[in-house]
Image (cartoon, rainbow, N blue to C red):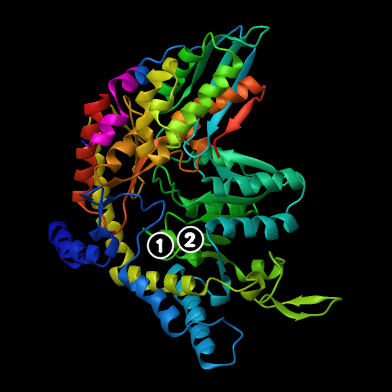
Amino acid sequence: MPSSEKSQTASIMYDIEAIRADFPILARTMHDKPLAFLDTAASAQKPRHVIDAVSHVYENEYANVHRGLYQISEAVTVRYEGTREIIRDFIGAAHTHEIIFTRNATESINLVAHSFGRNFLSEGDEVIITALEHHANIVPWQMLRDEKGIVLKVVPITDDGELIMSAFEDLLGPRTKLVSVAHMSNVMGTILPIKDIIDKAHAAGAKVLIDGCQSVTHIPVDVQALGCDFYIFSGHKLYGPSGIGVLYGKEELLNAMPPFMGGGDMISSVTFEKSTWAKLPHKFEAGTPAIAQAIGLGAAIEYVNGLGLDAIGAHEADVLKYATEQLSSLEGLRIIGTSPNKASVVSFVLEYAHPHDIATIIDRAGVAVRAGHHCAQPLMERMDVPATVRASIGLYNNRTDIDALVRALGEVEELFG
Amino acid sequence: MSDDLRELYQEVILDHGKNPRNFHLHDDATNEARGNNPLCGDQLVIYLQLDGERNVVDASFLGKGCAICMASASMMTDLVKGRSAEEAQSMFEAFHDMCTGEGDETALADNMEKLSVLSGVREFPTRVKCATLPWHTMVAALKGENEISTE
C-alpha cells in the first residue's frame, strides 16, 4: 500500500473526534475557553470506559479481595486478579504472578530499592542511572547509598537530550549491580535505546530496571523480548486511576527478594514466633490493595488496546511533529530536547518570559501545560535552564490543541516580548 | 487578554522583572539567606547589610525566578533600605497578608504603597509564593537563618 493511502486509512481508523468524545472532561471549559489539555505526561485524563468500570465496582461488586467467603467478594477478586492477566498480556510478561500491584511508579522503584537493593547490594557496589531521570529514579538510590555505601553513577547526555552510550559502556564494570533508567524522558521525550542498554548491562553481570512511566502509553512493550529484570509504570499516566502502579519483575528475582512491607495478605502463616510469606505476587502486596483502581487500570489497558498502541503512537507522532513545527517558528522560543528519537513531549523556554509566567498566562486561555523542573532538577541544571514549559500529548490531543497553545503564546509575547 | 492578567502583569511589575534593582552580590552583607521554591525551582539569595542597631543599611539579591518573584525582590530590596529590622519584619507581615487576601492594599503603610501593584496575585493562588518568597527569605536573613523553603 502506498504510504499516503496507508496514512489515510490510519486516520479513518483513528477517529480523533470519537476518541475525544470518550473523555468526558474534554468537553468542559477552563476560564470559559475550550480546554486544551496538554499535561498528559503529568497525569492522563480518563475515558468513560474507565470511569464506568470504577463506578461499576463500587455500585455492584465491592468487597475486600482474597478474604470474603461470599459471592460479591469472590466476584471482585476474580475481576481484580483478572487485571493482572490484562497487564501481563500488555507488557508480554511470562507469568501473571510477576505482576506486582503498587501505589504508583515511585513505590515500585522504592520496593526494588528496599527489597533488592538492601539485600543484594553492599558497600562499593554500583548503581548506574542517567542524567535525565525523574527524581523517583534518583532519590531512592541516594537513600540506599547513604544507608549501604553503594556508589551511584550517572550516564551523561548530549545537548540534544540523548544518552551518551559510550559513556555508559565506560561506567559499566565488575561492581555494577543495577542499571536503572527511564525508557523515555518525562521532560524531553527522548526514547532511550533500552534494548542495547539491557544487553550491555547483562553482559557486565548487572540487573536492569526500566522506568516505563512515560513509555507504556506510547510504545508497545515486551518485557521478555527486552529481557529487563524489572519494568515499572503507573496507572494514572496510562488513562487509569491514580493510586495504582505496577512492578514487573522476573520470577526468580522476585522469589529471591524478601517482602517490602509486612502485614495482612502477604503471609502464609503467622505465629508470634515466626511468620512465613505468601507466594508471588501476594508476598509484595501487604494490606488491602487499591481494588477499584486496579480494576480501573485493567479497563484503561482494554481501552488503549482497543485503539492500538501503534495507531496511538502514529497519531501522537503527527501531533508532535505539528507542535514542533509550529513552536519552532516562534521567535525567541527554544525547544529543550531535540533528539530525533522522541515521543509526545515538547519542552521549551522563551527568552523573554519565565515558564511560570507563561503557564499562568496561557491557563487563562484554556491551555493546561506543566511549568517547572518536572521533578528532574539535575536535568534542568544539565540543560542550563531553571525550568521549562512542557506540553505533552496524549492519545486525545489534536492540532486544535496545539493551535490554542501557539495562539496563547502570542499573548505572552504581547506582554513580555 | 483577561483583566486579571492585566492586573497581575502591570507595567511596573514587567519593568522590575526585566530590570531588577539591587540585583547584585553584596560584599559587605552581614546577613544572607537562600530561598527555594521546590515546586517550581525558583531560587534566590537575599543579602542584607545591618549596622550595630540592626538597621538595614543596604540590601540586594541574586537569583532566578519568574517576573513576579523578580519584581517582588526588586521592590522589596528598595523598600527595606534604611528601615530597622523590626520595621522590615512588619512590612513583611503586611505584604504577606495582602498577597494571601487576609489584608488588602489599603492596609499597607504609606511607605509601602508601591507594593500594591503586586496585589493581583490574590487572584492566582498558585502564584502567591512567587511574590512572597523574597520576603520570607529576607526575614530568614534577619533572623540569621541561612536557608528557607516555601514548602
Q: Position of residue A45 (x, y in %)?
A: 35, 60
Q: Is residue A119 left or right of residue A394?
A: right
Q: Position of residue A152 (x, y in %)?
A: 65, 42
Viewer-side residue, A49 vs A360: A360
Find out whether residue A330 is within the magenta segment.
no
Chain under callout 1: A
Q: Is residue A180 above or below residue A266?
A: above
Q: Provide the secondary structure element on which disc 2 rests.
A: strand
- Marks 1 and 2, how far apart at CA: 7 Å
In percent of width and height, residue A203 lies at 60, 53
Residue type highlighted by circle 2: Ser
Q: Is residue A352 visible?
A: yes
Q: Which residues are magenta?
A: B2-15
In the image, A166: left or right of A67?
left
The one nearer the camera, A119 or B30, is B30
Q: Residues within 10 Å of mark 1 (few under 14, many from 20)?
A: many
Residue at the location (64% across, 47% down)?
A: A141
Residue visible at 32% across and 19% down in the picture: B12
Label number found at residue A234: 2
Contact between marks 1 and 2 (CB within 8 A): the answer is yes
Above or below — where is A169 with respect to A256? above
